[in-house]
Amino acid sequence: SACSKYPRSFQANTNRSLVFCSSSFGEHKSERNSKWNRNSKGSSFGVSSSSSVEEPWRFSVESNEFVFFATCLHGLGEYLGLELDPKYNRAGSVKFNTRVLQVLPSGVYFACNSLAGGYQAVLWSRCATRVLIELGVAQLSPRKPYLEEIYNVVRECGDWNWLLNGGQLKFNVNVRTSNDFYNQNAVRIRVKDAICDAIRDTNGSKPSKPDQDESADVPLFVTLSRGEFRIYRDLAGESLHKRGYRTDTIHVSSLNETLAAGMLYMAGSTPTALFSEQKVIVDPMCGSGTLLIEAALLCLQVAPGLFRERFVFESWPDFNANAFDEIIADANESAQDETEYLFIGNDVHSGALELARKNSQFAGLHRVKCMQWYNEDIRDGHRFINASSTPSDSQIITITNPPWGIRLTNDIESAWKDLGQYLRQYAPCTDAYILSGQKNSSSNLRLKAERKYPVRVGNVDARVLKYHINEYRPQ
């Protein structure tokens, strides 16, 4: 068993104190439906059928199903959809009745008849940045003041006093709008007003308005696009790219963990099958090691959420502790000790490589013999390719995130030229996947991309470039 290897071992969490603990999914769903009836006939969020609020529901959802929205970096939605589809995912042996409703470039709607489907997504998804559970959706009337309509909708959408434990659980509100017509700050204030007033009307005392910068027990997300209003709870709290294995020091050019996972899926691994032919995964410019650490965790079937010590949903009144403990135990049991894959990381900068080694250790990979790190100039590729004793019949795949403009500015052109020479000389007849956020930088490789995968990194429209390296012919 791998139970003692990760912070979220099953044994370590069986004695946590709970606000609410149901003994079965059935009781849990009954409790939820009596308090927060999202799917009342002829209504939206429990608003009476005479209300002007209309329900623009686009999915066929059963009355006992929860609806979730998992967000991701723009461009990773296809891979996130595969992760969440039970026909394709590798999320342990415990399966729930989860089904994908809609796949978007930056997120996936899915449904499940248990909150446990959301717990499993939080624990196992490598591409998701957040997993949100929908509390309600409504179409706002263009003929009415939208702020007052939002206030009324939120007031009536459920039992806020129960959800926030009489105001004891702190909440905050994050707002995303599609255009400048909607004032985000004004929407945030009206949602807070509605929630606080609803609690006051229930228990007689109005809680103080939450500080937006304060950590919340119940983070709420509101989206407003083309008159469609949606409100969610965020199950994890912090973004899921924060796995928990990084050291306190983060390298300036560190790669987002969810993007690293997405690149691995682009490179041939999927939630159903790992790299079929490629057995040696090389990052010749590994920096702090994110790509190789994510690759190793994927191949070892380690759930990325095991490194997080706590998720905010564990303090919610509808938290199903039994279901979550089962998911945690199954994830620990699924984690492997060794793999047939070999991971080779190299970086010329000793400081970055030291971070890679530390991050790898915190991820529990110091126990794995297949993880190797080298501090060599990329032009001396033989020092880490030959030194690693790679099997002659192994197929090498190169996957890397070289420096580009917005992150690092020194010697970018020469770094890309060196990478191109390395690929031709030390990785012939293989595939390479390279992240680029700068159009001109990739031209220094002197290679023609076979495919370009668009992905948005912050405010940058980046590309993951796939190259097939031809046989090396010395000049």
Image (cartoon, rainbow, N blue to C red):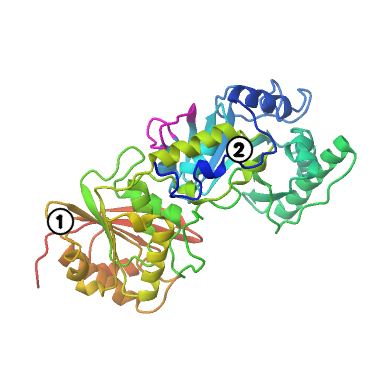
Residue 363 sits above or below residue 443 on the image: above
> Where is residue 193 drawn, in percent x and y?
81, 46
Task: Say which residue label 2 marks.
Answer: 133
Q: Quadrant of residue 350?
A: bottom left
**In the rendering, which numbered label is found on residue 373?**
none
Task: Residue type at mark 1: give it.
Answer: Cys
Q: Quadrant of residue 464?
A: bottom left
Q: Looking at the picture, how far across and down is residue 34, in whole percent?
A: 72, 24
Tag nearer the camera, 2 or 1: 2
Percent coordinates x, y for residue 262 in the rendering: 39, 50
Quadrant occupied by the C terminus: bottom left
> Which residue does the image show at 18% across and 66% down from the upper left?
387
User: Which stretch did the figure color magenta?
Assistant: 85-99
For badge 2, the amino acid type reads Ile
Q: Earlier in the sequence, mark 2 or mark 1?
A: 2
Tag 1: Cα neighbours inside 10 Å, few (<14), some, or many (≥20)?
some
Q: CA distance from mark 2 to mark 1?
A: 46 Å
